[in-house]
Image: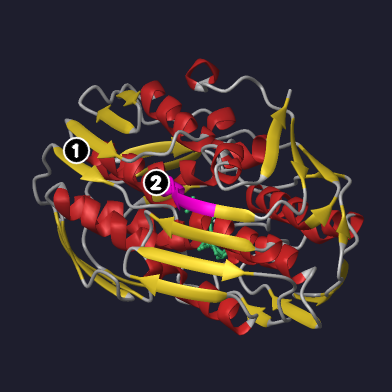
């Protein structure tokens, strides 16, 4: 994997604050859409091409896992070709599973293709316990026999034939919905998924599966009806822009002050975020495929609560916390998705932010000025939040452990410096 990772080994990012952001950006392809698509490609015994793939660590990691299973992945620029005809293994090493959460998508895909799978508990950002009970519930309802391993033992799943059924999700888990879609596409008969996640990334995944020959109906809603067992075929698909990366840049520009024209990701997926930014005093203009934002000086405080789509996206919670750190007044954030996603508050406090956490609520007393210093990224989106905070702070901010950021942002320094920010990697 490392030799596919083009960057030199990065250790930190240096940001000099208070440079106004001004420019246009077409945001990278969506990480959280392309990773499940790569798993879904396993269901087709042939070639699947995905275009506009971001060159990020998690994509290289997923390529490595697919290669280790006997597939062959080639990323030429931003075009990924997956040949899954050579799939010959259904067991994924523990070390690979622990690199990122989306490795668990292969459980449903391998069950669908090979009728068995051996995986381990997935890794990923430490933002909560992140169990997989809903994934297992859905797969067992479709007939999978699952034996969870003890200690170093893998989780073993097998099924003579996945059969269509009705699955009721008590919570719209994104990953569990994705695993259930893969199994349902391969199962014999019809599956109805009730209460499933309807994030834009799920909509893209359904379109990707239908483009491969599947029949997923109800796309965009919380009930999906899937006709399983249809023959799948080679296909080519272009993934849309990353709404979380796009939202990150919008929030960074709003916090630091400036002007940004964001293209490449539909504005619909960021409606909740742009409506809060308008309340805070930013000028926002939206069309279907672009968002223009202009902000100057200090914004006003706001209150948000994260939730499943179309609620405020938990992935932009930390970045919003950074923006609120300099807003006028007291803001609040209720984090209702991940129970440990406030870790970045400690780092923001080093920059002078005044934040009090009580259970799942953060109260932020906006300060007129933040002062740059050395901080540490603890997870992907928390790292992005520290970059945004650095842009808003007086002086220089150094963000250590920036490899977390590389997992999800193709080149955050390229993107932001292209819009006037003073930001660079340090070796
Ligand atoms: C996906 O994670 C995203 N990752 C996350 O983005 C995102 O934050 C999350 O969805 C919510 O939108 C990818 O798509 C690769 P969930 P996922 O299953 O699938 C609980 C980023 O920064 N839960 O919807 O893991 C879980 O503990 C990442 O790009 C169960 O209890 O999210 C959490 O509290 C971070 N049992 C909540 O549901 C289960 O079986 C949401 O999890 C599954 C989940």
Task: Identify the disc placed on residue 29.
Answer: 2
Graded by Cα atoms within 10 Å as few (under 14), some (14 to 19) or many (20 or more), the crowding at tag 2 reads: many
Between marks 2 and 1 in the image, the one whose residue lies nearer the viewer: 2
Q: Position of residue 283 (x, y in %)?
A: 54, 76
- Residue 345 or residue 301, whichever sits in front: 301
- Residue 78 or residue 236, whichever sits in front: 78
Is 140 situated above or below 298? above
Instruction: Please identify the quarter of the rendering in which residue 110 is found.
Output: top left
Disc 2 vs disc 1: Cβ atoms closer than 8 Å?
no
Viewed as shown, does residue 143 lie left or right of 339?
A: left
Question: Which secondary structure lies at badge 2?
Answer: loop
- Residue at figure coordinates x 8%, y 45% from the top left: 231
Could you tell which of marks 2 and 1 lies nearer the N-terminus?
2
Viewed as shown, does residue 40 lie left or right of 357?
A: left
- Residue at figure coordinates x 69%, y 64% from the top left: 255
User: For the residues marked 2 and 1, what is the alpha-carbon distance in whole angstroms?
Assistant: 22 Å
**The residue stretch that appears in magenta:** 23-31
Q: Position of residue 288 (x, y in %)?
A: 31, 69
Instruction: Please identify the quarter of the rendering in which residue 325 is found.
Output: bottom right
Viewed as shown, does residue 87 lie left or right of 243?
A: left
Q: Is residue 401 visible?
A: yes
The colour scheme used here is secondary structure
- Residue at figure coordinates x 33%, y 76% from the top left: 222
For label 1, the residue is 44
Q: Position of residue 143 (x, y in %)?
A: 30, 56
Quick check: is 310 in the magenta stretch?
no
């Amino acid at each position: 994997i490392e030799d596919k990772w083009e960057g030199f080994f990065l250790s930190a990012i240096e940001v000099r604050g208070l440079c106004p952001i001004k420019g246009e950006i077409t945001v990278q392809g969506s990480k959280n859409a392309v990773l499940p698509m790569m798993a879904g490609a396993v269901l087709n015994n042939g070639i699947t091409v995905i275009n506009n793939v971001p060159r990020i660590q998690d994509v290289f990691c997923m390529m490595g896992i697919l290669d280790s299973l006997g597939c062959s992945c080639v990323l030429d620029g931003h075009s990924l070709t997956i040949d899954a005809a050579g799939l010959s293994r259904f067991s994924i090493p523990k070390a690979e599973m622990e690199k990122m959460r989306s490795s668990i998508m292969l459980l449903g895909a391998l069950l669908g293709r090979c009728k068995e799978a051996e995986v381990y508990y997935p890794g990923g950002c430490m933002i909560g316990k992140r169990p997989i009970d809903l994934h297992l519930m859905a797969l067992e309802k479709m007939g999978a026999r699952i034996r969870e391993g003890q200690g170093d033992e893998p989780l073993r799943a097998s099924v003579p034939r996945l059969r269509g059924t009705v699955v009721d999700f008590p919570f719209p888990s994104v990953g569990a919905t994705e695993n259930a879609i893969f199994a349902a596409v391969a199962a014999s008969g019809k599956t109805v998924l009730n209460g499933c996640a309807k994030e834009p990334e799920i909509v893209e995944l359904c379109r990707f599966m239908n483009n491969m020959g599947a029949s997923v109906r109800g796309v965009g809603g919380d009930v999906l009806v899937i006709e399983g067992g249809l023959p799948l075929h080679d296909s080519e698909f272009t993934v849309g822009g990353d709404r979380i990366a796009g939202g990150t840049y919008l929030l960074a520009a709003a916090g630091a002050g400036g002007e940004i024209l964001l293209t490449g990701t539909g504005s619909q997926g960021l409606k909740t975020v742009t409506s809060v930014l308008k309340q805070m005093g930013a000028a926002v203009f939206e069309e279907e495929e672009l968002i223009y934002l202009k902000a100057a000086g200090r914004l006003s405080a706001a209150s948000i609560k994260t939730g499943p789509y179309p609620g405020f996206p938990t992935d932009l919670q930390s970045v919003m916390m950074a923006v609120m750190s300099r807003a006028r007044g007291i803001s609040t954030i209720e984090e209702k998705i991940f129970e440990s996603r406030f870790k970045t508050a400690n780092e923001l406090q080093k920059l002078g932010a005044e934040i009090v956490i009580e259970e799942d609520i953060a109260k932020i007393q906006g300060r007129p000025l933040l002062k740059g210093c050395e901080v540490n990224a603890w997870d992907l989106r928390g790292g992005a939040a520290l970059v945004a905070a650095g842009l808003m702070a007086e002086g220089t901010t150094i963000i250590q452990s920036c490899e977390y950021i590389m997992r999800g942002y193709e080149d955050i320094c390229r993107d932001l410096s292209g819009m006037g920010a003073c930001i660079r990697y340090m070796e």
